[in-house]
Amino acid sequence: MNKIRTLNNISEKGLGKFPLKSYELGSEIADPDAILLRSQQLTAADVSPSLRAVGRAGAGVNNIPVDEFTTKGIVVFNTPGANANAVKEMVLAGLLLSCRGIIDGIEFVNGLTGHTDKAALNKLVEASKKLYKGSELKGKTLGVLGLGAIGSMVAEMALQMEMEVLGFDPALSVDAAWRLSRRVQKMENMQSLFARSDIVSLHVPALDSTRGMINEETLSYFRDGSVLLNFARGELVETGAIAAALESGRLSQYISDFPEMDLIGMAGVIATPHLGASTREAEENCAMMVADQVLDFLENGNIRNSVNFPNVSLERAGSGFRLALSNNNVPRILGSVLSILADRNINVIDMINKSRNDIAYNLIDIESEPTADMVEDILAIEGVINVRVFADPD
């Protein structure tokens, strides 16, 4: 029986993927094999000897101590792209708010209480609408910083709205490159992206290399009166620099999904309470995606969409047993494991080995059932973190 601890409100569509005959789920589960969560903060205290995986129903993993979990051989999954459409639609809302007098217009209309003459009300509205005249997005230049699942969708949406679209991503993957329209103009660096854009939209993760990337220096490359949209992460910007840019006119607006105390109520700032992925559809998509990934890992050892381990997948063909091995990414460990198998006349049917930074992961399919003492011998190899045994699927 596998045990899953569920934190936050995980969609039933995701939880329903775990067969009740072989899985126990609940928020109070002790010594879980896996934890599923959304935004709750995890710490080292949440780690038990049985814990093998953490599944984040969303893209960001700032609430998970990934580095510490990696050293313990705990695989951390996320769900890139599952909430991309929801965030893209929020960016669309931000684009429209940036160029049309929507909010001021709504506030004006909400102040028109008490009128009893319909004709007089209509006359006042028509006379006042010029105060909220905006401009169209068509023909404007949007700079998209980060061209992953969300950024590429934002770029495509802007092209459909007949905007000129520039893009920059220093870590553009092959898959992302294939998704990207040829009409997106690739910039050599983010400075050139900023200098040519009327509106800049951020779509990069919060990493050590990206925190505070929008600062006094980088804002100096922006066009005067440009707009900055941030539906990615609040940590990407230095709020003091944003405030100064708004006061100087370098930025005309800062539209963000991450309210900051220093910016609330400031002219030119529109902030929403982290609504980007807050749709029923996005929550269901994330829950189902992370459930599939954790299921495949617990039952077959396969890893898809991990933020700390390599993606490793090996089809289980025919009969046999499987070893899943996590180890430090140093020489000779795999050779030592294979020697242990050879010494016991255990034939290897298939195997795969991949590494990511300081961690390596192996799936080894073998013909006969491994004994407990053999597993202990493998665990005794210096650098091995953990070993899991999967029974014959037949």
Image (tube, rainbow, N blue to C red):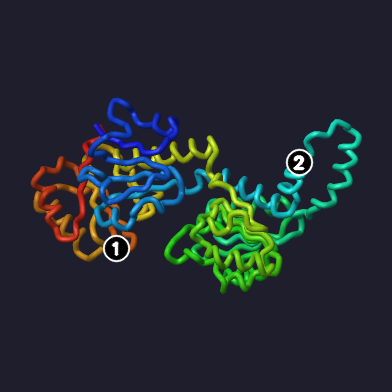
What's the residue type where badge 1 is placed?
Answer: Asp
Q: Quadrant of residue 126?
A: top right
Among the two numbered marks 1 and 2 on one chain, the one whose residue lies closer to the N terminus:
2
User: How many numbered marks appear?
Assistant: 2
Residue ID for mark 1: 358
Decide: few, some or many residues near mark 1? Use Cα within 10 Å; few <14, some 14-19, many ≥20.
Answer: few
Kindly identify the residue that appears in the image at 24 percent across and 53 percent down: 72
Give the vertical position of 227 relative to 102 (above or below).
below
Name the side, left or right, on which 346 lies relative to 260. Answer: left
Name the side, left or right, on which 378 lies relative to 12. Answer: left
Give SS at disc 2. Answer: loop
For the N terminus, the quadrant is top left
Kindly identify the residue that appears in the image at 37 percent across and 44 percent down: 55
Report the front residue among 32 and 94.
94
Residue 111 tag number = 2
Q: Position of residue 317 (x, y in %)?
A: 30, 40
Q: Position of residue 235 (x, y in %)?
A: 49, 59
C-alpha separation, residue under disc 1 versus residue under disc 2: 61 Å
Name the side, left or right, on which 138 lies relative to 157. Answer: right
